[in-house]
Amino acid sequence: MQAYPLIPHPARPPFDVRSVEARVKNDDPNWLTIRWRIDGSARLALPKLGGRRRLDELWRTTCFEVFLQAGEGPGYSEFNLSPSEAWNAYDFDDYRVGMRERRVEREPVLTMRPGSSMAIFDAAIPREMLPPLPCAMGLTAVIEEEGQVTSYWAITHSADNAPDFHRAACFTGMLEAPTLA
């Protein structure tokens, strides 16, 4: 498992959340598994369970995102994953240009386990949803706490004054072809 500590954007600091870490498990030929761990989750605001379905604007509350950019071109894919079990996947031709829903055959499996001091969010993404590997990768989290305090976490942030996960400068992780156990 590859661990990626995420850092909050300095313009939008958390209230109680102390840390967020994403761990990528890349050894299954059918699924990419990512686990986000949130420490300091006592005031974590979670959307209500709504069942597996495609939904837009999941980033307006607590959600988890994966950005993948294959090859040298400017295009990339975005996967939005919610504790409500809603999800969506998009393709972009360039930075925030040409957005369209990514075609998929199977839905991701999403599981949220909240706790008073720590919370875990697991996402199993079907491999056929992914672009060709290897890919530059951005792992992110939008964390809403009680009182509408929202922080934006990423492996790294661009130099912008506001959080923007779509910038290629944020895609500093690497997702290789699966290493089969």
Image (cartoon, rainbow, N blue to C red):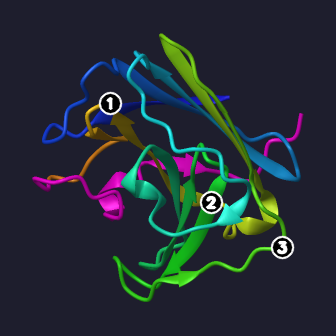
At a point 58% along the width and 68% down the height, the residue shown is: 55
Q: Secondary structure at mark 3?
A: loop
Residue 59 sits in quarter: bottom left
Task: Residue type at mark 2: give it.
Answer: Trp
Specify whether residue 170 is painted magenta.
yes
Q: Label 2 belongs to which residue?
A: 87
Q: Is residue 47 above or below residue 44?
A: below
Judge from the rendering whether residue 12 lies leftward or rightward of residue 174; answer left or right.
Answer: left
Amino acid marked by disc 3: Glu
Picture layout, residue 27 above or below residue 126: above
Mark 3 or mark 2: whose residue is earlier in sequence: 2
Q: Which mark is residue 146?
A: 1
- 105 vs 49, left or right, is right
Residue drawn at (67%, 50%) of the image: 85
141 to 19, vertically: above or below: below
State the residue position of label 3: 105
Spatial CA span between label 1 and label 2: 22 Å
Position in image of residue 133 (x %, y %): 68, 62
Main SS of the magenta part reads loop
What's drawn in magenta, residue-wise?
Answer: 160-181
Q: Residues within 10 Å of mark 2 (few under 14, many from 20)?
A: many
Q: CA distance from mark 3 to mark 2?
A: 14 Å
Q: Nearer the viewer, mark 3 or mark 2?
A: 2
In the rendered structure, does residue 165 fall within the stretch colored magenta?
Answer: yes
Looking at the image, tell me whether mark 3 or mark 1 is earlier in sequence order. 3
Cα–Cα gap, marks 3 and 1: 36 Å
